[in-house]
Image: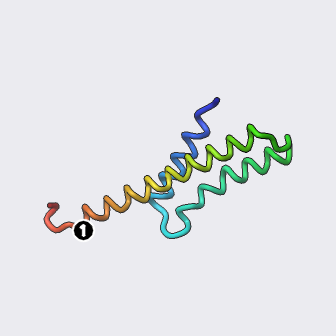
Amino acid sequence: MVVTAYVLFFLAGLAFGYAAGGRGRWAPLALPLLLALVAALSEGVDGTMLLRLLVALVVTAVGVVLGVLLDRSGQREVSAPGGR
């Protein structure tokens, strides 16, 4: 299994989770869905594609959640007076 795509989905989720606000944080979930739609239209739907889509969505969502957590911890450090 090629891991590169999943690493890219994770990084996209992490970046959007950290930098984007509101519902825009979840925008990277559209990329695996669009790629799966294109693959389904050209090659048909099978179990392998559905499993890969599920893994891609989970990896992307984990990246978004970690990005949000990083953003919140960074805001907490900045708001602390005197850096304590």
| The C terminus: image quadrant | bottom left
Q: Position of residue 26 (x, y in %)?
A: 56, 61
Element on which disc 1 rests: helix
Residue 32 coordinates in the image, percent (x, y): 67, 49
Q: Which amino acid type is marked by label 1?
A: Ser
Residue 39 horizontal/vertical position (percent): 79, 44
From the viewer's perspective, tell me whether residue 26 is left or right of residue 14.
right
Using residue 70 as the reference point, say whether residue 19 is left or right of it.
right
Mark 1 neighbour density, 10 Å: few (under 14) some (14–19) many (20 or more)? few
> In the rendered view, would you say 10 is above or below 29?
above
The quarter of the picture where residue 55 lies is top right
Q: Which residue is mark 1?
A: 79
Residue at image location 68% in from the left, 41% down from the top: 52
Q: Nearer the viewer, residue 52 or 17?
A: 52
Give the colour scheme of this rendering: rainbow
Q: Is residue 46 above or below residue 83?
A: above
The percent position of residue 62, horizontal first and vertical second, equals: 50, 50
Does residue 5 appear left or right of residue 41 in this picture? left
In this orientation, which residue lies closer to the viewer: 39 or 52? 52
Given the current orientation, which residue lies at the most extreme front position?
47
Q: Which residue sits at x=50%, y=55%?
A: 64
